[in-house]
Image: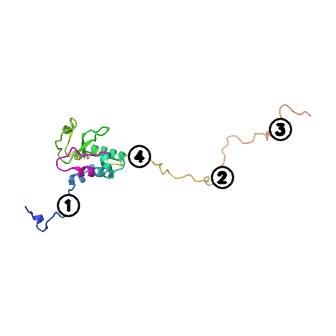
Amino acid sequence: MANGRNKSRKKGSGRDPGGFVALPWSVLDCPAFLGLSHPARSLLLELARQFVFDNNGRLLASAAYLATRGWKSADVITRAKRDLIEAGFIHETVKGHRPNKASWYAVTWQTLDKIAGFDPGAADTFVRGAYQKNATLRPSPGVGKTSIAPSPGVGSAPPTPSPGAIRGVFTVPPTPSRGNHLEMPSAGRQLHH
C-alpha cells in the first residue's frame, strides 16, 4: 500500500541495505539519556544493535562479546552497565557468573520477550519505560563531584616582604637599663677606693 509520503519515491527505502537500530525519540530526548556518560550511551547502542524482534531479555554486554566490537576496558563496561541500569534503560534478566555464564539484559523501551532461562522474578520486576520514571531521580553527571586537582588558591605570596622595613616589636628594650651589662663590674668583684 502506498501512502502520500511515498508517491515520489522510487523503489527502495532510500537507505543502505541491512537491519537498523530503532531508538524512539522519547529515549533520545529524555533527561535520563541526556545525563548519561558517553560510554553508557555507546553501550546502549551496542545493546540496541543486538535487538531483533523476539530477543529482548537476552542481550549481551559481557566483556568477551564487546571485545569483538572494539571495547577494551572491562571497568568502562561495568560502569556503563551500572549507569544504564540505574537510569532505567536496561534491565538485567539473568545474573551472570564465572566461569562462563554471561548476564542477559533487556532494553526498557521495548516489551520484554518471553524467553526461557530468566532468573526468578526478573520478568516481574521489568518496567517498560523505566527510563522515563527515573529521569527526575538522577542528577546529571558532574553535579556535586569534587575536583581531584588542588584548588588554584587565592594567589601566591610575594617573594619579598611588604613595602617598608620590618620592625621588631619589643616590650623590653634590647639592652639592659643602666647601661650595657658588659661594661659593669660583676657583683662579686666590687672595688673599694
- Residue 59 drawn in magenta: yes
Question: Can you identify the residue that label 4 sits on?
Answer: 146
Q: Is residue 143 toward the left or the right of residue 181 in the image?
A: left
Which residue is painted at 79% across and 39% down in the image? 181
Q: Earlier in the sequence, mark 3 or mark 1?
A: 1
Give, as a single range, the part of the protein colored magenta: 44-62
Circle 1 — which element? loop
Q: Earlier in the sequence, mark 3 or mark 4?
A: 4
The three-letter code of the residue at mark 1 reads: Pro
Q: Which mark is residue 165?
A: 2
Question: Can you identify the residue that label 1 sits on?
Answer: 17
Circle 3 — which element? loop
Q: How far from the left and from the top, in percent, is residue 100?
A: 30, 40
Between tags 4 and 1, which lies in front?
A: 1
Q: How far from the left and from the top, in percent, is residue 4?
A: 10, 64
Q: Which class describes the residues within 10 Å of circle 1: few (<14), some (14-19), or many (20+)?
A: few
Q: Which class describes the residues within 10 Å of circle 3: few (<14), some (14-19), or many (20+)?
A: few
The three-letter code of the residue at mark 3 reads: Met
The three-letter code of the residue at mark 4 reads: Thr
User: Marks 4 and 1, Cα distance to the nearest angstrom?
Assistant: 47 Å
Q: Which class describes the residues within 10 Å of circle 2: few (<14), some (14-19), or many (20+)?
A: few
Q: How far from the left and from the top, in percent, is residue 180?
A: 79, 41
What color scheme is it?
A: rainbow
Question: Can you identify the residue that label 3 sits on?
Answer: 184
